[in-house]
Amino acid sequence: MSQHDLSPLTPADVQRALDALGRGIVVRHYAESTATSELAAQAIGCEVGQIAKSICLMLEDTRPILVVASGDQRLDMKKVAALHSLSAKRVRMANAEECVALYGYAPGGVPPLGHRHPPQAVWLDEKLRRYAIIYAAAGSAQTIFPVATDDLPLLNGGRWADVARDA
């Protein structure tokens, strides 16, 4: 990869990916940070659970996958690993450099679509289905886009799964 390949993608890249779907979804820009689920919910005026956080993971240090989780849930690495017939020790969070190199975005701004390299798998947290509309990061720590929860699989080919820790 050249140095140019490692520059982050932008909210404009996310908007282009959304436009290609032809569903009229528009990236929203905020003056305040939306980098965490709590901050995003405050900026939007919604429940924390409506925030769709895109979590970049690595399987066996070589295979990037994406989990889109509800903002009020914690990811269960054992459940994610089991979806790939692996032990939890074989799954880890991608570091910031891997997020930019593989997905195109820094943590806190990773969208559920429009990645530099498509993840090998995309899992969608079943808990997001509590809501009709969810809000996902759009390429920066100050951009979000709304999407009908039922449309989430259309954005990225993701499959619904139970990936949250049990209460």
Image (cartoon, rainbow, N blue to C red):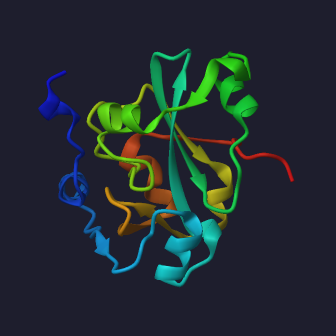
User: Could you tell me which quadrant the N terminus lies in?
Assistant: top left
Is residue 161 among what the camera can see?
A: yes
- Taking the image as shown, residue 86 lies to the left or right of residue 7, namely right
In-front residue for pair 31/161 = 31
Answer with the quarter of the image where residue 50 lies.
bottom right
Q: How many marks?
A: 0
Q: Position of residue 120 (x, y in %)?
A: 43, 25
Image x and y of residue 46, in percent: 56, 80
Identify the residue at image location x=22%, y=47%.
9
Return the residue nearer the eye: 125 or 74: 74
Q: Does residue 105 lie above or below 127 as drawn?
A: above
Q: Is residue 149 left or right of residue 16?
A: right
**Residue lying at the far right of the rendered structure:** 167
Which residue is drawn at the image coordinates 59% and 70% (left, top)? 38
Q: Is residue 131 visible?
A: no
Residue drawn at (28%, 68%) of the image: 27
Tell me where residue 129 sits by quadrant.
bottom right
> Which sits in the foreground, 133 or 41?
41
In the displayed structure, 163 sits above or below 27; it is above
* Image location (x, y in percent) of residue 88: 72, 23
Q: Which one is nearer the viewer's eye here, 42 or 83? A: 42
In the image, residue 122 sits, relative to residue 147, either above or below, namely above
54 vs 80: above or below: below
Residue extending farthest to the bottom is 45
Q: Position of residue 137 (x, y in %)?
A: 41, 60
Lateral position of residue 78 relative to residue 49, left or right: right
x 55%, y 75%: residue:
41
